[in-house]
Image: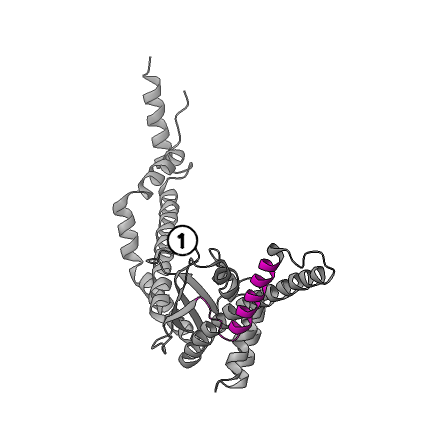
Amino acid sequence: MMPSSPRSSAAPRSAASDIEFPQVLSLLRRAALPVLAVTVLAGVGGYVLSGLQPKVYEATSTVFVEPGNSGSALDNSLLKPSVLPRGGLQLALHSPAVVELVVTGLRATDTAPARVNELQRDLRAELSRGSFKTLQVEADPGSQSGTSGGGVFTLSARANTPDLARVLANISVSALQRWDVQRTQSRMEQARTALKLQLDVLDRTAQDGGLSTDPVNNQARASIVRDLAVIGSSRQSVVGTMDVIAVAVTPSRPVTPRPLRTAALAALLTLLFAGGGAVLLGSRRQVVRDWDSVPDEGSPLYRRDSRDSRNVTSTVP
């Protein structure tokens, strides 16, 4: 059996010593100053760069949506909006109709036209992308908004100034309320048209002498006339299903950026990567030093080690 050379046996011993915990601590202590310096620079840089980003403020308003209520068939089908399904309020807020109502409401305020145009571009861009950040609405976790569609919802609006965020949130709630009333009025107009068609059919039938004296025909005609009268008197007094619980107030601090959080994350990541790099670099240098300490084949020490190893091998039976 040929003896293993000292150079080949030095590498495993060196690799085994590289993963020892005391040596890792020693390498970290030796590289403490560079690692800490890089960490501090990364934290300061993250803080400065985060502070240079535009500030975004968020204002919230809370609304209550009435669930589907019981009552007469006419009240439920004509005088009240249809019950919104789960997630319907979010879809309505991000619909083109509500977005246009929001922009129209903003133009009626004291908001600068340049900012209104910028918001309009942002909202339309979000509509085209299908990704929404400016306006959001979520169900309150403590609200029991079941399949009836009712419950408490929180609407949030983001803008680059506190006042604009507050105005945008309140205008968005008003736009949703207007949309809620308009869909009721649309349902009433459709019902009015359908009832008038039914009444015309009954009148033509009566004029032809087909069902003029039929009690069922007279009862149906009286019911249609009554429904038309109710619709006509209620067109201007339609109310929606949404009530404002809390209006939006001016936020005191931005939601983004957060320089302290950004600086802490940057410093922590830099500390981890710099510490790992210092340990890896120090272990590689240690391996190189161990290899350099192995005697060359032509040196007297190598010849003596080889002779001793042959003598040990020859004594084996």
Q: Where is residue 174 in the image (x, y as percent from the top left)?
A: 46, 74
Q: Where is residue 140 in the image (x, y as percent from the top left)?
A: 36, 60
Looking at the image, residue 261 sits to the left or right of residue 197; the answer is left
- Regarding residue 54, the answer to whether it shows in the image is no
Name the colouring of the figure. one colour
Residue in the image at 46% along x and 71% along y: 239
Query: Which residue of the protein is positioned furthest toward the top in this rendering?
Result: 317
Quadrant position of the N terminus in the picture: top left
Residue in the image at 53% along x and 81% along y: 116
**Toward which corner of the image does residue 317 lie, by quadrant?**
top left
The answer to which of 154 and 133 lies nearer the viewer is: 154
Tell me the amino acid under the disc marked 1.
Gly
Image position of 286 with respect to 53: above or below: above
* Range of residues picked out in magenta: 218-241
Residue in the image at 48% along x and 66% along y: 133
**Toward which corner of the image does residue 195 lie, by quadrant?**
bottom right
Query: Which residue of the protein is positioned furthest toward the right in this rendering?
Result: 208
Image position of 296 with respect to 309: above or below: below
Looking at the image, residue 89 sits to the left or right of residue 217; the answer is left
User: Mark 1: which secondary structure?
Assistant: loop
Magenta run includes residue 155: no
- Report the predominant secondary structure element of the magenta stretch: helix
Could you tell me how many numbered marks the image carries?
1
Magenta run includes residue 226: yes
The answer to which of 177 and 39 lies nearer the viewer is: 177
Q: Position of residue 193 (x, y in %)?
A: 64, 66
Q: Give the residue pinned by disc 1.
A: 146
The answer to which of 97 and 9 lies nearer the viewer is: 97
Q: Position of residue 158 (x, y in %)?
A: 44, 72
